[in-house]
Image (tube, rainbow, N blue to C red):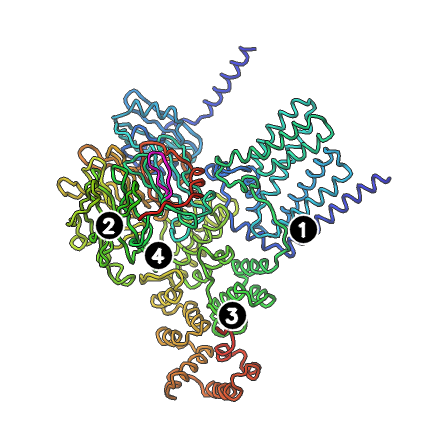
Amino acid sequence: MKTRFYYILVWVIGAFVACTPRPKDANKVSALPPMYPDYTDITIPYNIAPLNFLLRNDADAIEVVAQCGESVLQINKKGHEICFPIVAWKKFMNEAKGKTTEVKVSARINGRWLQYRTFKWQIATDKIDPYLSYRLIEPDYEVWNHLQLIERCVENFEEHVICDHNLVDNSCMNCHVYGNQDPKLSLFYVRGKNGGTVLNRNGKLRKLNIKNSQTISAGVYVGFHPSGRYGVFSSNIIIPAFHAVDSKRLEVYDTKSDVFVADFDSNTIYSCPQLSDSTVLETFPTFSPDGKYIYFCAARRVNLPKEIKKLKYSLCRISFNAANHSFGTKVDTIYNARLKGHSVCHPKVSPDGKWLVYTVADYGTFPIWHREADLQMMNLQTGAIDRLATVNSNRSDTYHSWSSNSRWFVFASKRDDGLYGKPYFCYIDRAGKAHKPFVLPQKYPAFYDDNLKSFNIPELSKGKLPFNAVDIERLMKKENEKFK
Amino acid sequence: MRSRLSIYYTYGIIALWAIACLVFFQGFYSYHFFYKEQTQLFLFSADYLNTYFSKPAWLACMGGDFLTQFFYYKFAGAAILTIVLLLLGDFTRRSFECCMCGRFSFVIALVVMTVEAVFYFRADFRLSSAVALIGSMGLFLLYCLICKEWIKWVVAVIFIILAYWMFGYGCFVFVLLVVLHDISQPKGWIKLALLVLAVGFPLSMRAHYLLTWQTSLSYPGLGTFQKPNFTIENIFALDNEYYFGNYDKVLKIVHQSDKSLPEVSYFYNLVQARRGLLPDSLLNISQQAQGLFMKLGPNASMIDLYIGGEVFDLCGDMTFDEHSAVLANVFSSQNRNVRMVKRLAEVNLVNNDTAAALKYLRILQKTFVYRKWSARRMPGSQTPAVKDYLQQKRQYINRLDTLRNAGNYRLVLAGLLHSNPQNIAALDYLLCDDLLRKDISSFKKDYDTFFLLRSKRLYQEALLIYLAGTKAKPEECIKYHISDSLLKEFNEYTAIYVQTKGNRWALRDKFGHTYWYYFHFINKR
């Protein structure tokens, strides 16, 4: 009986192997495989999930061989999609850590095998923070329905919902941001009747109304002080408007905006005239990793929307003393929009304090639909600016977030279709050189083709959040804590 | 003999019921099916099918949506619904026969079928509900095959969990049938335990499926009793015929409709503008005081969002065409709407944004119905007809960049006219919109800016109001080519108006279709 079972098993396995297509007399071609997502010649962290992909041609069988010294990862599949088995992938990544892998892709098209030019994967020893949070929203941003905040593990394909539309009365929710890439320090807003600012600090959830009589609105853009006690917020009166020509679509501008600091211990708001000048629009605040400075963007007010193209934000910095929550008297201009001719958005300093990455666009404060919007990286010790040519595309490349080891950052790019933002990861090596970025891998290679939502404000974190969507549902039933 | 007669009666009643269902839904309610099909998007892709598992009732929803995609074809909607309801009736009859209700099973089946049919009067009610019922009854019929008692109870527990996973609220139907089936047997506590499980399991899965407790117990959605809504059916008919280019039929439906509905005048205006006859026919039907556009935004009804983009498509504003398509998409079931995905593909093709167009065309290639439609539009393999269509649309697109707020349609149309003064649809929409809102000074400004010697009586009537109001000199009338006969008519109207102290009845017969009459008496603020 047992012998018969093994006989059948061997027969079944043999039949399966015999059916798996393998290249025969493959023609070598000089072109790279037409793979989507583009995972050719990239640097990846060893802890990343399998880079599943598809070929944009009529392939009915594929072979992929990734080789790094003695280690080989080979997969043969029918169809035009490749999904790596996660266990084999992890094993291979651990063996190839710190090395360069050659990847050979062959495809069968109309009965003939083609072997494409090999490409390389550089497997970095620097790990990327394993969790990524983002908001899923249609790329119109003016309206919403069925919003979700998601936390995804980038080491595999697991995701869980942080906040779900069903459980918060289909309210609008804004993006989730971390402090120090720490899962026990984060914040997001739920708008609407029972809404408020959700603060996750030391694993405890609070619902805050961060607004007083002086602030012009509730908080919008936010950055945490490294101590976790303070948050720096912008308050903005935001106006959406539509471009008449095809590519830019939506423009959002502020008619008023200020920056303030909120103390989460005493529920107090602090500000200073330099951050709330009525003739200046201040926004996108963030603390330096040592907490001694607040970086923010500022622009002189112009006649809007007529003079929108004259609205250019400089990158500024003001000192902050956490001991007595006082501000410096002098504002330093780090990037002068008037001289450089561009507008700066979303500045963020790397956790090691060496680099400052920000978005530059021709004008305005909403670069998401600006094709020319690119990331730039400033060396904070020398002031030298890297235009990140290997990182940017001819579509909008914007909002970024650092990994806790300062070796990786994630950013939102519309490079594939110009419409839907996707999270791309970029490696910064020890010499400060940026490597070609790659998109967040998905379980199904066709995911991005079918998906009709943008990944908004991607943020990296060292660990899994200590709460879920049901906790937020419960929290929303509580009263807001007020600020003075 | 009696039993054979009774079988004949049974089949006769079922046949009559099926014919009535088919005739009603095909003859009087068929446009609802097209709407249901257009406001969903079913893809043959592993990634898409996997999304069904994020909620309970995956099999019911997948099955329902799979069948709904065929509602696109004429007669398919009514036929599919009738077959599904007959299947539901048959499963109901068999289930109740197993529950020792043999005598009433036929009547119960008829009632269930009829109730379910009534639920389909609602435009947003989905076929998944009937599939959920059929599936859960199917599980019950399987359960009835088991003879050993202890196995039955174990299977019942497993089937409750399976029923919720695959058929959502169908698990309650399953449990109720089990209780009914075994009502005569002892061990009532087991039946009670099963009932508790049927309620407790969905509630315990609430956090997993991210549903409110009400939705977790009623997924994929319970029906509501309502009368057939022929007003909405009429709007769907207008939309459908307009979509397929049957403009004469649109006008025919308009004349048979309640003209006070904004959607009716909206389609009427679209057809007339398409034919260049908007100013000639504007006042032939009841018009809305707020103008020629549907109010779009998060608070608009789904139907208005669904149809609201047509005017931008006609006039050539691709930004607002795209924006309204995204709006309708966002508020559709599962945020997916095949009509809007097609529109988004076309908008981006018109804009020559190949990468964006490919995004949507690739999605449509994964559908059963629109695969060929997509193939004909694929960059590089477009048919001559598609190329001509796109070329024609490209003539009218905006070339000057301005910033416009969502509700500022005057700026939208003016922008189009600045880019292409030959855009007659945009011109007529701009001028007629001014007139319906009785904004005579804006009308005069727009007329002077964009008018292309388009001699339309409506515009001249409105100009006379402006000229009279500003006490213009007679030369002004000559400048605007206002004929003596029209001037004479205006003087006559004015004289009667003054004489009768603005008595509309004295003016209605002779001047009821003039703009002067509209200006004084219609849509009074």
The label nearer to you, 1 versus 3, is: 3
Is the residue A281 above or below the residue A4 in the image? Answer: below
Q: Please, what is the three-letter code of the amino acid marked with disc 4? A: Pro
The label nearer to you, 2 versus 1, is: 2
Calculate the distance from the C-alpha at mark 3 to the C-alpha at mark 2. Answer: 54 Å
The location of residue A201, given as percent across then percent down, is 33, 37
Answer yes or no: are tags 2 and 1 on the same subunit: no
Q: Name the residue under label 1.
A: B22
The location of residue A304, given as percent across then percent down, is 28, 61
Q: Does the magenta stretch include residue A359?
A: no
Q: Name the residue under label 4.
A: A240
Q: In this view, does B341 lie to the left or right of A242?
A: right
The magenta-colored residue range is: A198-207
Q: Residue B287 carries which label?
A: 3
**SS under mark 2:** loop
Calculate the distance from the C-alpha at mark 1 to the C-alpha at mark 3. Answer: 36 Å
The label nearer to you, 3 versus 4, is: 4
